[in-house]
Image (spheres, rainbow, N blue to C red):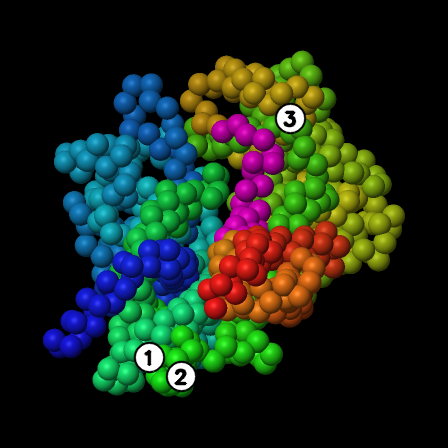
């Protein structure tokens, strides 16, 4: 231990004597470890770490086999819950947007998100309240029988000022009174990791809240189901048990045709979102490890050069009795000291970034928060990465130390065997580092170009120059039918605003937070099982004028009018994909009919262009639009196209909405801003890859600079002789930098090839991402060339400034 402490003190003295080397090494390692700590913290919080509930290891979500089919119907949930033999219990939950107020004076109604949950939700999870109590299964006695609400801790703290007397008070959800019976603990944010709810209400109150009862509709898949497995039961056994129940339900009910079940880990809304999120995080973790590998390669090269420069000192120490193992141990302690300092700095930087990430709300329309609190696992990983990195870049000088000839070093002044004609381990490490850098830079450019293209792509609508006013009249207590006259007046007054060219409404905007779909059957269908449907299409309710306001081209047929109401035959407008798949061509679709169920026959009166409806990277979907007057909806997006600045339109819309009903909650923003949800995967991928590319570029500069500077410093005498013999400056520069430039070219080519190959995976996340764009290739080439110029500029100037006379006098 005494010897170890001596080595550490000696290492600190050595590092203090070389501040530039020490700062470079610590910063390099801090970047690599900091990136890994950030990524691993997010990965740990969202993927690896279970839900923050008691005994989470046997908690699973019941999903379906097709990817993205993660919700169930309430009747199917009851069947699973009551008939299974492998679960201790099951609970159901869904999300509910509601206008929430305390009913005090003229308080503004604000839109909040909460959970609708089955009565046994909290009991199944084993959560205890902060205050009051939770609702239970015995509180439910049929529809609208449990007007109770449990508040989220953040809502209670922020909106109610942590009122200790809140239990027993009344708050209003969509103007319906609910009694506060409890407050959730601060550590519990529901069973979805990214959504922080303001409240929980019993699911049996759905009809009271929204005027719609999905509790009796077997074909309405709107809720998530979770369950706890019995001791000794595997997920495979539980899935087989549920699939046996699903087969029985499919035989008994046409709506349950093709029903199946599988188990997934809860927390990320099933595999529809969780699957891509887990794959993306795993890929980012791999990239972060590549950055750390580049940092280690960089540091290994720096330490190798440092060991070579200290060869005379080391030779003298061995000549006076120091053993090779003792010298090696001191160098290792120096490396570990740098690693620990770099790891501490990287962890500190990571904590700052994670705090900023926790305050970030990526989608304004949804309460999505990525709150990451590093736990002991994260810090253990940081320590292990630091120690492993220190050991890794300390191993490279071992061969140099072992080959030191003390007698030769004392005679010649150098113990390093400097050779520049064969490929060395340092060269290989530098090529690896540059390859990683080029790979990440290529991926960054591909993602950036895809992002820029996606902003100007054809979505089937034109968001440029459009202002959206989101008004949910259900939050103010209006039913669907009561909301229709209000929407008409809103449209009439918005159309009178100077500069407005067209207006319309739609119940859910394409590429928004939510969407609906329905199975479509042929006109002559009598069997309405799922397997007998022709296609599955997204659906919207629109007003007359919406297509013009949205910039959606009507290819054939006609638009809706206000005469297309509940007293006229049911009609629809479909997109090209629907027309081709159902009727083989666009013109043939006009006048044709289709069904959504036994009693819902629709005539097609128009066909519009295809578009994007749920995600930018989706395959072409079928879509259908229905007249708002035939299918009213209390939720409305007022679409206003105009040539005047948005702030002027926004102020006019505020006056109109407040004049119609001061209690209407609304938000006004541009349509481009509302695309944040759809663009979130692309933006996250672009930002992540850009950050990784920047870190790799910084490491590549330092690594290439180190190689070039080392090459010049070790060949100063040779370069001086060349100049004395008449060599031209360009020849001197070529002799000095030929090796590092060659390594740069080799690593860049390899990294560019790997980047192009990896871009196929990136295209699944970033819309329009392709490596075939010449701008991407030119950007990568220009970037790597710039990095080479930056890294070799100072060594090149030093090589050109060699004074042969001075060198010969020193010799």
Q: Which mark is residue 408?
A: 2
On the question of residue 273 being in view, the answer is no
Could you tell me what secondary structure mostly forms the magenta stretch?
helix
**692 left or right of 48?**
right
Q: Secondary structure at mark 1?
A: helix
454 or 800: nearer the viewer: 800
Disc 2 to disc 1, C-alpha distance? 9 Å
The magenta stretch is: 667-691
Residue marked by disc 3: 640
- Earlier in the chain: of badge 1 and badge 3, it is 1
User: Which numbered disc, 3 or 2, marks the residue closer to the eye?
Assistant: 2
Disc 1 to disc 3, C-alpha distance? 80 Å
**199 left or right of 735?**
left
Q: Quadrant of residue 381?
A: bottom left
User: Which numbered disc, 2 or 1, marks the residue closer to the eye?
Assistant: 2
Magenta includes 681? yes
Mark 2, Cα crowd under 10 Å, few <14 / some 14-19 / many 20+, is some
User: Which numbered disc, 1 or 3, marks the residue closer to the eye?
Assistant: 1
Q: Position of residue 57 (x, y in %)?
A: 30, 71
Residue pictured at 58% horizontal, 17% vertical = 648
């Amino acid at each position: 231990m005494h010897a170890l402490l001596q080595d550490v003190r000696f290492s600190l003295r050595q590092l203090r004597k070389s501040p530039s080397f020490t700062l470079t090494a610590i910063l390099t390692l801090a970047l690599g470890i900091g990136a890994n700590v950030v990524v691993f913290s997010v990965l740990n919080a969202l993927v690896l770490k279970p839900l923050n509930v008691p005994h989470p290891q046997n908690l699973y979500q019941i999903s379906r086999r097709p990817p993205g089919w993660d919700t169930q119907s309430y009747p199917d949930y009851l069947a699973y819950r009551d008939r299974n033999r492998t679960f201790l219990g099951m609970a159901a939950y869904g999300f509910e947007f509601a206008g929430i107020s305390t009913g005090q004076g003229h308080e503004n109604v604000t839109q909040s998100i909460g959970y609708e949950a089955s009565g046994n939700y909290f009991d199944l999870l084993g959560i205890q309240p902060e205050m009051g109590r939770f609702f239970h299964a015995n509180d439910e006695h049929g529809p609208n029988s449990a007007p109770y609400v449990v508040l989220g801790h953040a809502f209670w703290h922020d909106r109610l000022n942590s009122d200790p007397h809140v239990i027993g008070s009344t708050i209003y959800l969509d103007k319906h009174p609910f009694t506060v019976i409890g407050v959730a603990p601060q550590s519990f944010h529901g069973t979805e990791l990214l959504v922080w709810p303001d409240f929980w209400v019993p699911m049996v109150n759905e009809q009271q809240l929204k005027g719609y009862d999905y509790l009796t509709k077997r074909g309405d898949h709107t809720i998530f189901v979770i369950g706890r497995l019995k001791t000794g039961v595997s997920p495979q056994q539980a899935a087989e048990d549920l699939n046996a129940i699903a087969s029985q339900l499919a035989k008994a009910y046409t709506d349950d045709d093709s029903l199946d079940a599988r188990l997934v880990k809860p927390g990320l809304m099933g595999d529809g979102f969780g699957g891509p999120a887990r794959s993306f995080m795993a890929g980012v973790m791999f990239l972060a490890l590549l950055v750390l590998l580049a940092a280690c390669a960089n540091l290994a090269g720096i330490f190798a050069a440092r060991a070579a420069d200290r060869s005379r000192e080391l030779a003298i120490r061995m000549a006076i009795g120091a053993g090779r193992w003792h010298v090696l141990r001191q160098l290792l302690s120096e490396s570990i000291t740098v690693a620990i300092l770099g790891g501490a700095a990287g962890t500190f930087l990571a904590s700052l970034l994670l705090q900023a990430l926790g305050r970030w709300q990526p989608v304004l329309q949804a309460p999505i928060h990525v709150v990451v609190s590093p736990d002991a696992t994260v810090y253990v990983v940081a320590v292990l990465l630091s120690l492993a990195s220190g050991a890794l870049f300390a191993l490279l000088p071992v061969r140099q130390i072992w080959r030191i000839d003390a007698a030769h070093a004392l005679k010649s002044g150098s113990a390093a065997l400097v050779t520049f004609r064969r490929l060395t381990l340092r060269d290989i490490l530098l090529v690896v580092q540059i390859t990683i850098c080029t790979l990440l830079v290529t991926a960054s450019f591909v993602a950036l170009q895809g992002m820029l293209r996606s902003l100007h792509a054809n979505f089937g609508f034109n968001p440029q120059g459009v202002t959206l006013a989101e008004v949910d009249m259900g939050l103010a207590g209006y039913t669907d039918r009561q909301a229709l006259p209000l929407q008409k007046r809103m449209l009439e007054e918005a159309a009178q605003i100077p500069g407005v060219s067209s207006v319309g409404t739609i119940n859910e905007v394409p590429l928004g937070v939510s969407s609906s779909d329905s199975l479509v059957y042929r006109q002559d269908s009598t069997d309405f099982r799922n397997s007998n449907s022709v296609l599955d299409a997204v659906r919207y309710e629109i007003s007359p004028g919406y297509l013009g306001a949205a910039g959606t081209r009507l290819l054939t047929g006609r638009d809706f009018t206000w005469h297309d109401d509940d007293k006229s035959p049911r009609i629809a407008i479909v997109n090209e994909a629907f027309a081709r798949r159902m009727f083989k061509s666009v013109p043939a679709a006009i006048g044709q009919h289709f069904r959504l169920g036994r009693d819902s026959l629709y005539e097609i009166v128009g066909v519009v262009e295809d578009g994007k409806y749920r995600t930018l990277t989706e395959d072409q979907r079928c879509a259908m639009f229905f007249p708002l007057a035939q299918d009213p909806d209390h939720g409305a997006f007022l679409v206003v196209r105009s040539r005047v600045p948005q702030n002027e339109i926004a102020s006019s819309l505020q006056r109109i909405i407040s004049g119609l009903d001061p209690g209407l909650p609304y938000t006004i923003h541009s349509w481009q801003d509302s695309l944040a949800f759809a663009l979130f995967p692309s933006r996250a991928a672009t930002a992540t890859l850009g950050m990784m590319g920047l870190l790799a570029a910084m490491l590549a500069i330092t690594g290439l600079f180190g190689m070039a500077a080392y090459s010049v410093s070790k060949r100063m005498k040779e370069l001086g002789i060349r100049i004395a013999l008449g060599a031209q400056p360009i020849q001197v520069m070529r002799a000095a930098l030929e090796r590092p430039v060659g390594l740069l070219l080799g690593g860049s080519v390899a990294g560019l090839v790997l980047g192009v190959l990896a871009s196929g995976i990136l295209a699944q996340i970033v819309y329009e991402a392709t490596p075939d764009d010449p701008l991407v290739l030119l950007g990568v080439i220009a970037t790597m060339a710039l990095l080479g110029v930056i890294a070799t500029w100072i060594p090149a100037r030093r090589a050109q400034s060699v004074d042969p006379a001075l060198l010969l006098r020193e010799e």
